[in-house]
Image: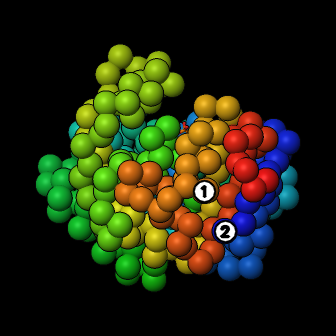
């Protein structure tokens, strides 16, 4: 695992975006896994700028988002469909036919998860997966206790996750369940980029990167992946002892 400690959020966002753009230029038809949350917003802004000002071409990419809330229409302002449209998709030249997010509104949620997993397989697997990290160490929406071999599945969200995400978005309510790539799905990605910023993430980053590998801290499994790069700002890295 490689850990890149950046001065601040802006540098973290820029370095992560340049890492991805280098991969895209090297393999224009790559399969890119995408994440939501506040953390990657700056990285998406920089990727959008690289497209606008430097011609970074997204047209050959296939993308798969990690997760989506169950029961939300695509145009619901709380949905990850809306988040991705606002923060990336409307700013770059991705081919809409090659963009994938679990359909949270599907009536057969388990069937939708199986379909999603099969689509990832059919695309040849994920070349590079972007991850954030939840306050309890979740990756995607894989909450503590999730099986390390799990594939895309329906998740009952931890109360803390719903509360944190409600507060961040300023929402009165959020669904208590979601569809998420599994830990097994994520671990099959050939390369992984983990982003974390801010003081609030310092303890969980220390546990995930330097603590025991345990399902209690889902992100700790990344210690066993052969190719992970963590972009952290100084605050998120502040409790790492091996800095
Ligand atoms: C959500 C997403 C995760 C994300 C996490 C952290 O729960 N499902 O994929 O990593 O939030 O979000 P933030 O970056 O806002 O801290």
Report x, y in % for residue 222: 53, 65
- Residue at image point 23% right, 67% down: 114
Q: Name the residue under label 2.
A: 1
Rendered residue at 47%/62% (across/down): 213
Are there few (<14), some (14-19), or many (20+) residues within 10 Å of tag 2? some
* Residue 75 vertical placement versus 116 (above, below): above
Task: Give me the residue at 75% from left, 74% from top.
Answer: 25
Up-down: is 35 above or below 63? Answer: above
Viewer-nearest residue: 38 or 143: 143
Q: Which mark is residue 44?
A: none
CA gap, disc 1 to disc 2?
Answer: 9 Å
User: In this figure, what is the number of numbered marks?
Assistant: 2
Determine which of the numbered discs, if any, sits on residue 209 in the image.
1
Compared with 38, 215 (above or below) is below
Asked if the beta carbon under badge 1 is closer than 8 A to the nearest atom of ligand 1, the reply is no
Q: Do the residues labelled 1 and 2 touch (CB within 8 Å)?
A: yes
Q: Can residue 109 be seen in this view?
A: yes
The secondary structure type at the circle numbered 1 is helix
Label 2, ligand 1: CB separation under 8 Å: no
Residue 45 seen by the camera: no
The quadrant in which the N terminus is found is: bottom right
- Choose between 229 and 109: the one closer to the eye: 229
Report helix, strand or loop for mark 2.
Answer: loop
Please state the horizontal and vertical placement of residue 3, each as a whole percent of the image. Answer: 73, 60
Q: Where is residue 12 in the image (x, y as percent from the top left)?
A: 77, 47
- Mark 1 or 2 closer to N-term? 2
Name which residue lies at 70% across and 42% down.
239
Q: Which of 92 and 135 is in front in this view?
A: 135
């Amino acid at each position: 695992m490689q850990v890149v400690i950046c001065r601040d959020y802006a540098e973290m966002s820029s370095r992560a975006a340049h890492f991805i753009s280098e991969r895209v230029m090297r393999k224009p038809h790559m399969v890119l896994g995408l994440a939501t949350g506040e953390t990657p917003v700056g990285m998406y802004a920089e990727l959008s700028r690289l497209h606008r000002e430097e011609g970074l071409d997204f047209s050959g990419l296939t993308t798969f988002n990690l997760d989506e809330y169950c029961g939300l229409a695509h145009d619901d302002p709380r949905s990850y469909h809306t988040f991705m449209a606002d923060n990336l998709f409307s700013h770059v030249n991705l081919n809409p036919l090659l963009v994938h997010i679990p359909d949270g509104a599907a009536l057969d949620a388990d069937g939708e998860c199986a379909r999603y997993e099969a689509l990832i397989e059919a695309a040849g697997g994920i070349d590079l997966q972007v991850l954030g990290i939840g306050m309890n160490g979740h990756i995607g929406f894989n909450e503590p206790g999730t099986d390390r071999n799990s594939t895309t599945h329906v998740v009952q969200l931890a109360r803390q996750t719903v509360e944190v995400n409600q507060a961040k978005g300023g929402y009165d309510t959020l669904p208590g369940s979601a569809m998420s790539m599994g830990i097994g799905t994520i671990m099959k990605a050939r390369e992984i980029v983990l982003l974390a910023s801010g003081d609030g993430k310092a303890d969980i980053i220390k546990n995930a990167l330097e603590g025991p590998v345990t399902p209690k801290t889902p992100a700790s499994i990344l210690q066993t992946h052969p190719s992970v790069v963590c972009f952290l700002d100084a605050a998120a890295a502040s409790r790492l002892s091996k800095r």
